[in-house]
Amino acid sequence: MTNPTSAWRPGMPGGDTLPTGPAGRLAAPSGDGHGPETGPPTVTIGSYPDYPSAQRVVDYLADNRFPVEHTAIVGTNLTLVETVLGRMTTGRAALVGAGTGAWFGLFIGLLFGIFTVGNWLAVILVGLVIGAIWGAVFGAVAHAMTGGQRDFTSASSLRAGQYAVIVDVQFAEQARQLLGRMHLTGGRQQPA
């Protein structure tokens, strides 16, 4: 008996037989070859300027017993925004490191304090202080080693320009009917 995968040769006679996929089912190559299969075909039922509007639509569908496991909210026109929070100096890096080290020292102190017969509070405080000192040292050294390459702190976030609510094709008509009722009863969103 021959293995079905050994018989498959693209472009060769008999190459029409595809290799078995997961669970032994025949599987054709999927997608465009640039990533995982995306799932069943979908339809956009509405496009909204902000996430809360799209979320309200999906919540309305859920409240009306729509199978929301067949929906998705897709953010498009993504923009990465890096908000600069302030200047980073060696002193500030040491202070941030001391705070981080203090938390780690507190954790270690609590861990050792559990098993201490004597003064467990002293063990916790010593862990906190030693953690803060080492954190400050490592924070200052790490910042000094950057050589002034990044002398600021920041926070990054992704923002979408628009949010689309999509549903699987077989549920699109049901979703559109429910959205029609939503807009008749005073809903604020208008699908695009």
Image: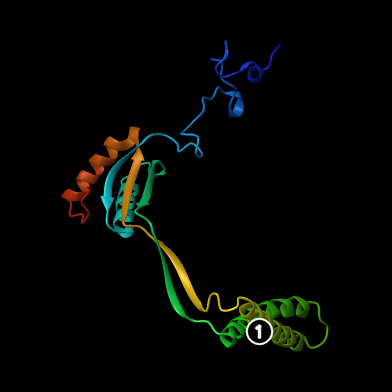
Number of callouts in the render?
Answer: 1
Q: Which residue is mark 1?
A: 136
User: Where 158 sits versus 9, above or below?
Assistant: below
**Amino acid bearing label 1:** Ala
Left or right of residue 140: residue 44: left
Quarter of the image for the N terminus: give it: top right
User: Where 164 sits versus 36, above or below?
Assistant: below
Q: Position of residue 27 (x, y in %)?
A: 54, 25
The one nearer the camera, 151 or 130, is: 151
The chosen color scheme is rainbow
Left or right of residue 73: residue 179: left
Q: Position of residue 134 (x, y in %)?
A: 71, 82
The one nearer the camera, 141 or 157, is: 141
Q: Residue at x 30, y 42 (%)?
A: 44
Q: Position of residue 125 (x, y in %)?
A: 71, 87
Q: Residue at x 51, y 39 (%)?
A: 36
User: Where 12 sits versus 73, above or below?
Assistant: above
Q: Position of residue 16 (x, y in %)?
A: 53, 15
The one nearer the camera, 56 or 130, is: 130
Badge 1: residue crowd in 10 Å (few <14, some 14–19, many ≥20):
many
Which element is circle 1 on? helix
Q: In which quadrant of the rendered view does residue 140 lie?
A: bottom right
Q: In which quadrant of the rendered view does residue 103 lie?
A: bottom right
- In the rendered image, the residue lying farthest to the right is 117
Q: Residue at x 72, y 78 (%)?
A: 110
Left or right of residue 68: residue 127: right
The one nearer the camera, 186 or 155, is: 155
